[in-house]
Image (cartoon, helix red, strand yellow):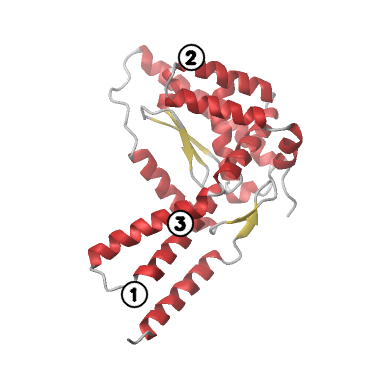
Amino acid sequence: MNCFPRCIATCVLSLVAAALLSACASTTPGGRSQMAAPEPISALYSSFDLSMTLAALAPVVTSCVGLQCQVDKGFERQVLRLGTRLAEAAHATYPDLKERVPQFTFIVAEKIEAGSSSDASGTIVIYRGVRKARIDEETLAYLIAREMGHVIARHHDEKSAATIISSLIAQLVLAPANLARGVAFIASSTAGAFGKDFVSSGNVPEQRKEADIIALDLLARQGWSDTEIVDSLLDYSNRLGRDSWSTEVEQMAMHLNNYKSANAVALAEPVAR
């Protein structure tokens, strides 16, 4: 069997991977080495990923009526106000951030589910479902700051790099196989998704910690202490009752409570470049 076409394909894909990821080694604000995709590519990947995430969530079924519309608009203004304050603190704390993310965008998505998400370009999304119980400013500010922490620490760029690498690996493995086109596409997509999760899953705890500590630093610059944030999260969780979101909020509080002040200072301090 002539392996020449396979060798050519392997070389081409290897060169593509090298070109995409060359000079993309970087460090997080805490000094952890990371492989991050180039910013234009990451912006495209993460924007698509955010769109897919939001599309998969159930929308709010009924539109607001009367007073509820005023309450909803007030919540949107609150998110924008808190986000703007935190963005100013972020740009002041991380001078290089302004070039990569000139401005953050803050959106309230009409989703029943409670939670938040973001992308590499600085789009921060808070789901309408977080208001299933009264939410204090400290908790809302934390949810916003945590997503900003993921952007600041380039976690979306890491995820994009993992997607690129895993997809190329899948193509290297499956492209030479004599598979039907439809089967090859399904197999390649599945392998790519599995590879992406495998490559990036090991960094999840570190990413969560980095985002949390960056968030605490930004919040401290707005006058909120770690204790106030943790207490606010626990109070909010108690008002929610017992559901998956309440459990997640409790875990947030637990993680924050476990971080030591020395580590917080070290991770929040930008690395000199």
Label 2: which residue? 239
Is residue 81 in view from this perspective? no
Label 3: which residue? 163
Q: Label 3: few (<14), some or many (≥20) within 10 Å?
A: many
Name which of mark 3 and mark 2 comes first in the sequence. Answer: 3
Q: Write the residue at 38% across / 86% down.
A: 4
Verify CB contact (< 8 Å) between mark 1 and mark 2. no
Distance Cα–Cα, label 3 vs label 2: 38 Å
Name which of mark 1 and mark 2 comes first in the sequence. Answer: 1
Which label sits on residue 176?
Answer: 1
Q: Circle 3 — which element?
A: helix
Q: Write the residue at 62% across / 34% down.
A: 215
Quadrant of the snapshot with the C terminus: bottom right
Name which of mark 1 and mark 3 comes first in the sequence. Answer: 3
Place of residue 240 in the rendered image (x, y in percent of width and height, measured from the top left): 45, 17
Q: In the depicted view, which residue is nearer to us: 220 or 97?
A: 220
Q: Write the residue at 59% across / 51% down.
A: 100
Query: Mark 2 belongs to which amino acid?
Result: Arg
Place of residue 53 in the rendered image (x, y in percent of width and height, measured from the top left): 38, 41
Query: Mark 1 belongs to which amino acid?
Result: Pro
Q: Circle 1 — which element?
A: loop
Place of residue 129 in the rendered image (x, y in percent of width and height, measured from the top left): 41, 25
Is residue 95 in view from this perspective? yes
Name above or below for residue 29 compared with residue 127.
below
Distance Cα–Cα, label 1 vs label 2: 56 Å
